[in-house]
Image: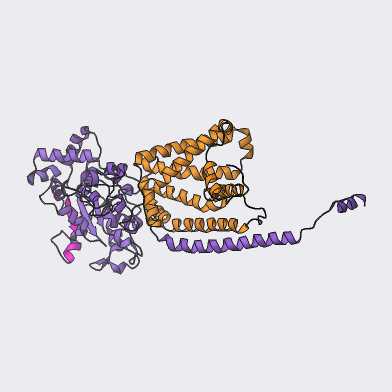
C-alpha cells in the first residue's frame, strides 16, 4: 500500500468508520446518562436553579480559592495550557476548518499558520509536562490507570503527527498526513469509551451540580 | 540509426553555440542540485557521448507526453538535445509506417542489444491484452520483448510510471505501470501528466553524463527533479501561512493571487519541479495561472478525491453514515437507559428493610 492509498483510505472509509463509531458511542453514553433520571425532589425549591447551574459551568473552571491554586498550581496551569492549545490547534487551523465546513456547512476565521504552529509546540510541551508530573508524583502515579496513559498517548499523537506533517519531519508529507488523520481516527474510535467523554459530560455535570445546589438555596 | 558522431558534433551541426551548450549543461547541473564544478564534467561527458539509441514505445496513452516534449515554440536546447539522441523508434514521430515500423525497431534492438534506452509512455492493459495492440502485437508482449535488450527503462508520464488515467478506478482494462511487469531492469520513473520537457531531457542527460541511474525516491523518481515539494516551493506559500486564500476562482483573493489550498490545490502532497522550472520555457505553471496543482506526478492522482475539494476534506460523504450512527446511538442509548431504570426499579421493589429488632433477633439466635 502506497502513502497515497493510505491517505485516500484515511480521508474516505477510515473517516466514515471512525466518525460513525464516535457519533454512535457518544450518543449512547449521553442518552444513557440522561435516562438515568433522579429521584423526585420533595423539598420546596428555594430558587429556580437555572442561573446557578449556568454560573457553575464557568466558575468551576476558575481556581476556587488561593489555597487550591497554590496547592495545584502545576495541574491548573499545565491543564489550561494544553486545553487552550488543543482548541487553537484543532479549531483555528485552515485545513481543519475546511474539514469542519465540509461537515457542518459553515466556516469561521482561521489564525495564521505560524501562530497555530506555536500553539502546537506549546501543547506538546504542556502534555509532556503533565505526563512527567503523572510519572513523578507518587500519589498521582498510584492513582493512574493504563487508560490514563492511553488517553495521553491518543491526545499527543495527533498533535505530534500534525506538527511532523507541517514541518516535513522524518517522513514525507503524504505519509505524515495519512498517519496524522489515522491517529485522529484512532482517537475518535476510542473517544466514547474512555475518559475523553469528559469533553461532553463535563459541562453537563457542572451545570447539574450548580442547578441542584441552586435549588437548595446554596449561596454562590 | 546510430552513427559515430558525438552529441557535441550533432549539436554543432544543429547550430548550437558553445555558449548555448554550456548554458544547457549549467541549467542541467543546477536542476540536479549539483555543484557548479560539475558543469565541465557534464559538458565533457555529453561532448564525448555517442548518440545513444532510444526506442520509444507508446501504449495506453494520450500522446500528451510526446506533445510536451515536441511542442516548444522555438527549437530549444532541450528539443535539440532530443534530436541528437538516436530516436530509432517512436510510433508518433517516425516517418516509417506499416511493417517498416517494426523492422526499424528490431534492427535498432539488434544493433544496440543491451545498450539501448527504452522509453515507455502509457500503461499496459493486462486485463485483456487485446485492449491495446500495435500491429497485432499486444502491449504486454511488446514491452517484455523490447525490455529484454534494454540497458535501462525510462517510464515517461504518470501512466507508464504509476498507471495514470487508465489505472483509475474501476480500471476497466486492468492497466498496470511498467514496474509491475518488468522486474529485472533498472526503471526510472518520470511521472507527470505530462512531465516537464526539461525534466525528460534532464533525466536522459543525467544518465548519459554519469552512465548510471540517478538517485531516486521511494516512488522511483529522480530526486534531482522530484525531490522538492510543490507546496514548499510555491511562490504563493506566504499566503497559506498568513491564512489568505482564494475562496472561488473569481473572488478578490483569486485576483490577488492568494493561496489555492481551499480550491483543492494538491501542492502539499505533490513532488515535482513545476514550481521552480515552470512550463513553456519558464513562462508559467498551473498555480501561477490561477489553478491549483492536480498532483499529476503522484500515483493515483485521479482517485484522490474531487479536484476542487481541499486536501483536508473527506473524500466521501460521511453525513449519511453519521446520520444512521446518530439514530442507532440514540436507540441503543434509550435501550440501555431503559434497562438501567428497570434494574433500579427492580432493586427498589426487592429491597428488604431491616429493623433494629431484626438485628437483635439475629444476634441472639
Q: Is residue B59 left or right of residue A141?
A: left
- Asked whether residue A191 is drawn in magenta, I would say no
- Asked whether residue B94 is drawn in magenta, I would say yes
Residue at 63% x, 39% y is A143
Q: Where in the figure is residue A62, as x and y percent of width and height?
A: 52, 38
Residue A39, can we see it?
yes
Colour of chain A in the image: orange
Q: Is residue B47 or residue A132 the one in the foreground?
A: A132
Question: In the rendered image of this protein, does residue B34 appear above or below residue B231?
Answer: above
Toward the right, the furthest residue is B365
Q: Spot the purple chain and give its letter.
A: B
Magenta residues?
Answer: B83-101
Q: Where in the figure is residue B273, as x and y percent of width and height?
A: 25, 45
Q: Where in the figure is residue B164, as x and y percent of width and height?
A: 30, 58
Q: Is residue B267 or residue A24 the one in the foreground?
A: A24
Question: In the rendered image of this protein, does residue B140 appear above or below residue A45?
Answer: below
Please name the colour scheme applied to the rendered image: by chain
Residue A168, can we see it?
no
Q: Is residue A124 or residue B49 the one in the foreground?
A: A124
The quarter of the displayed image where residue A139 is located: top right
Residue at 27% x, 66% y is B132
Q: Is residue B333 left or right of residue B223?
A: right
Q: Is residue A63 left or right of residue B133?
A: right
Q: How many marks?
A: 0
Residue at 18% x, 43% y is B49
Q: Where in the figure is residue B277, as x and y percent of width and height?
A: 21, 44
Amino acid at each position: 500500500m502506497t502513502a497515497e492509498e493510505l491517505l485516500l483510505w484515511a480521508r474516505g472509509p477510515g473517516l466514515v468508520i471512525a466518525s460513525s463509531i464516535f457519533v454512535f458511542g457518544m450518543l449512547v453514553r449521553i442518552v444513557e446518562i440522561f435516562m438515568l433520571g433522579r429521584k423526585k425532589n420533595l423539598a420546596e425549591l428555594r430558587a429556580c436553579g437555572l442561573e446557578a447551574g449556568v454560573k457553575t459551568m464557568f466558575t468551576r473552571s476558575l481556581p476556587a480559592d488561593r489555597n487550591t491554586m497554590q496547592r495545584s498550581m502545576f495541574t491548573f496551569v499545565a491543564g489550561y495550557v494544553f486545553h487552550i492549545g488543543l482548541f487553537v490547534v484543532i479549531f483555528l487551523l485552515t485545513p481543519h476548518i475546511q474539514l469542519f465546513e465540509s461537515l457542518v456547512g459553515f466556516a469561521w476565521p482561521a489564525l495564521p499558520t505560524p501562530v497555530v504552529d506555536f500553539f502546537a509546540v506549546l501543547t506538546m510541551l504542556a502534555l509532556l509536562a503533565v505526563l512527567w508530573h503523572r510519572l513523578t508524583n507518587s500519589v498521582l502515579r498510584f492513582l493512574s490507570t493504563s487508560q490514563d496513559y492511553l488517553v495521553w498517548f491518543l491526545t499527543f499523537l495527533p498533535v505530534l503527527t500534525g506538527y511532523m506533517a507541517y514541518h516535513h519531519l522524518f517522513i514525507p508529507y503524504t505519509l505524515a498526513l495519512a498517519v496524522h488523520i489515522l491517529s485522529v481516527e484512532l482517537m475518535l474510535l476510542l473517544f466514547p469509551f474512555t475518559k475523553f467523554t469528559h469533553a461532553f459530560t463535563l459541562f453537563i455535570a457542572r451545570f447539574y451540580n450548580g442547578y441542584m445546589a441552586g435549588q437548595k438555596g446554596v449561596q454562590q | 540509426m546510430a552513427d559515430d558522431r558525438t552529441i557535441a558534433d550533432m549539436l554543432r551541426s544543429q547550430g548550437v553555440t558553445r555558449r548555448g551548450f554550456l548554458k544547457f549543461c549549467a541549467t542541467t547541473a543546477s536542476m540536479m542540485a549539483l555543484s557548479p564544478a560539475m558543469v565541465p564534467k557534464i559538458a565533457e561527458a555529453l561532448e564525448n557521448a555517442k548518440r545513444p539509441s532510444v526506442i520509444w514505445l507508446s501504449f495506453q496513452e494520450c500522446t500528451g507526453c510526446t506533445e510536451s516534449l515536441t511542442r516548444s515554440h522555438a527549437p530549444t536546447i532541450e528539443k535539440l538535445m532530443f534530436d541528437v539522441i538516436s530516436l530509432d523508434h517512436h510510433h508518433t514521430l517516425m516517418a516509417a509506417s506499416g511493417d517498416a515500423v517494426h523492422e526499424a525497431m528490431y534492427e535498432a534492438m539488434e544493433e544496440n542489444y543491451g545498450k539501448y534506452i527504452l522509453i515507455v509512455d502509457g500503461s499496459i492493459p493486462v486485463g485483456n491484452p487485446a485492449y491495446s495492440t500495435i500491429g497485432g502485437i499486444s502491449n504486454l508482449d511488446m514491452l517484455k520483448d523490447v525490455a529484454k535488450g534494454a540497458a535501462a527503462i525510462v517510464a515517461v508520464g504518470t501512466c507508464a510510471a504509476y498507471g495514470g488515467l487508465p489505472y483509475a478506478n474501476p480500471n476497466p482494462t486492468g492497466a498496470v505501470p511498467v514496474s509491475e511487469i518488468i522486474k529485472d531492469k533498472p526503471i526510472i520513473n518520470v511521472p507527470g501528466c505530462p512531465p516537464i520537457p526539461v525534466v525528460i531531457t534532464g533525466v536522459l542527460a543525467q544518465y548519459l553524463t554519469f552512465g548510471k541511474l540517478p538517485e531516486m525516491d521511494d516512488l522511483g523518481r529522480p530526486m534531482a527533479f522530484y525531490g522538492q515539494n510543490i507546496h514548499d516551493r510555491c511562490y504563493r506559500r506566504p499566503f497559506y501561512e498568513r491564512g489568505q486564500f482564494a475562496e472561488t476562482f473569481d473572488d478578490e483573493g483569486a485576483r490577488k493571487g492568494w493561496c489555492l489550498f481551499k480550491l483543492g490545490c494538491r501542492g502539499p502532497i505533490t513532488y515535482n519541479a513545476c514550481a521552480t522550472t515552470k512550463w513553456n520555457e519558464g513562462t508559467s505553471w498551473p498555480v501561477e495561472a490561477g489553478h491549483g496543482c492536480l498532483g499529476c506526478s503522484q500515483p493515483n492522482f485521479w482517485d484522490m478525491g474531487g479536484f476542487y475539494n481541499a486536501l483536508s476534506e473527506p473524500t466521501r460523504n460521511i453525513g449519511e453514515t453519521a446520520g444512521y450512527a446518530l439514530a442507532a446511538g440514540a436507540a441503543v442509548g434509550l435501550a440501555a437507559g431503559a434497562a438501567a431504570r428497570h434494574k433500579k426499579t427492580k432493586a427498589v421493589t426487592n429491597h428488604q428493610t431491616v429493623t433494629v429488632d431484626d438485628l437483635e433477633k439475629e444476634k441472639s439466635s
